Amino acid sequence: MTIPYQPDEPGNAPAPLPPAIVSAILRDPDSPLYPSQIGVFCDDCGTEVSGDYMVSTEQTSAERLEVARAHLRTQGWVSTAAGDFCPPCSVSHPSEPRLFHLQRDHDVSGVSGTGRVANGVLWPDGTVSLRWIGERPSTVHWDRLADAEHVHGHGGATRIVWADEQP
């Protein structure tokens, strides 16, 4: 095996080492772990993050992916049955159901009044359930939070207020 970089020779610039050499340097002969580059894509915006993770030959590809996901969760990523989501997109894809209410500051339509007008749940798959409060309560389901906000937000006259403090 040829090493592409000889630091003793003048004029030689560092060059990337081939994966076989990196593996030989990092691999402990008594350990089944070896470095593997794993990429994870955000299923909303397409952001890609890849990194080197220590995995085992005994792990399935799903288990190896989980090694990367576990690290990315510490960086604000969320992984659900609906996919992997980077920190900006994770707000719309929580790992647990997230409660909120709609707070209407100005009643544009003259129907719902002002104040707390609906209670809602953002589900881990990104769908939303809204239960309207008032004389004629009703329940509506949306495929995405952005769609519910577009229809019921009235250009900022109605706000989403999260029951929890995070993101």
Image (tube, helix red, strand yellow):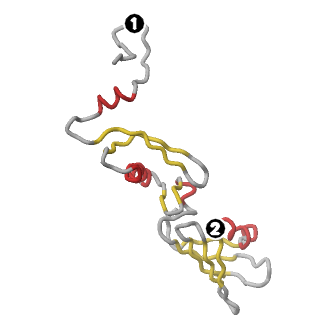
Say which residue label 2 marks.
145
Is 36 located above or below residue 98 in the figure? Answer: above
Q: Nearer the viewer, residue 38 or 117?
A: 38
| Location of the N terminus (image quadrant) | top left
Is 39 located above or below residue 165 in the figure? Answer: above
Rendered image quadrant of residue 52: top left
Q: Which numbered disc covers residue 10? A: 1
Which residue sits at x=54%, y=45%? Answer: 48
Residue 61 percent location from the top left of the image: 40, 49
Residue 21 percent location from the top left of the image: 34, 26
Is 84 located above or below residue 155 in the figure? Answer: above
Q: Is residue 97 left or right of residue 64?
A: right
Gap between marks 1 and 2, in whole Å?
A: 60 Å
Q: Residue furthest left?
A: 30
Which residue sits at x=37%, y=7%? Answer: 9
Amino acid type, callout 2 = Leu
